[in-house]
C-alpha cells in the first residue's frame, strides 16, 4: 500500500537523525501501512519508532500525551504539504 504514496521517507530519515524516540501519526487512510512504515524507518535509523493510533484530524491534532511518553520527535503525515 505504501507504494501508492510519496511519504518522503528520505526527508523523514534526515529529521529523525539524533532522535531516540519518534512517534508517527498517520491519517486513517495510511494506518494500514503503519507497520511497514515503522519497519522501513527502523531499518534506516537507530530510533525507537512508535505509532500513534489515536485520531489525527490535521496538523493541529497533536497528542498531548507525547511529553509523558518521552518522545523526541513527532512525524505527522497528512493529505496536504504543510511544512518541513
Image (cartoon, rainbow, N blue to C red):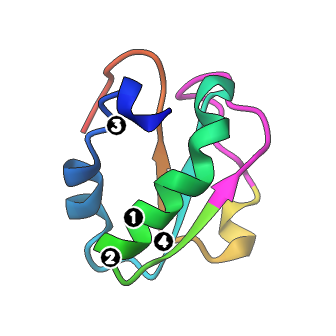
Question: Label 4 neighbourhood size at 10 Å, few (<14), some (14-19), many (20+)?
Answer: some
Q: Name which residue lies at 66% across and 37% down.
A: 31
* Residue 25 within the magenta-colored segment of the rendering: no
Dot label at residue 41:
1
Which portion, as a residue range, is magenta? 51-64
Q: Nearer the viewer, mark 1 or mark 4?
A: 1
Q: Earlier in the sequence, mark 2 or mark 3?
A: 3
Dot label at residue 83:
none
SS class, disc 2: loop
The reply to whether discs 2 and 1 touch (Cβ–Cβ < 8 Å) is yes
**Residue 45 percent location from the top left of the image:** 32, 76
Question: Label 2 neighbourhood size at 10 Å, few (<14), some (14-19), many (20+)?
Answer: some
In the rendered image, which residue does mark 4 sit on? Answer: 72
In the rendered image, which residue does mark 3 sit on? Answer: 7
Q: Kindly report the distance in space between the C-alpha atoms of the residues bearing marks 2 and 3.
A: 16 Å
In the rendered image, which residue does mark 2 sit on? Answer: 45
Amino acid at each position: 500500500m505504501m507504494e501508492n504514496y510519496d511519504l518522503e521517507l528520505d526527508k523523514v530519515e534526515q529529521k529523525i537523525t539524533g532522535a531516540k524516540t519518534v512517534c508517527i501519526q498517520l491519517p486513517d487512510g495510511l494506518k494500514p501501512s503503519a507497520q511497514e512504515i515503522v519497519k522501513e524507518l527502523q531499518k534506516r535509523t537507530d530510533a525507537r519508532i512508535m505509532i500513534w493510533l489515536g485520531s489525527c484530524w490535521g496538523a493541529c491534532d497533536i497528542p498531548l500525551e507525547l511529553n509523558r511518553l518521552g518522545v523526541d520527535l513527532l512525524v505527522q503525515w497528512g493529505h496536504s504539504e504543510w511544512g518541513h
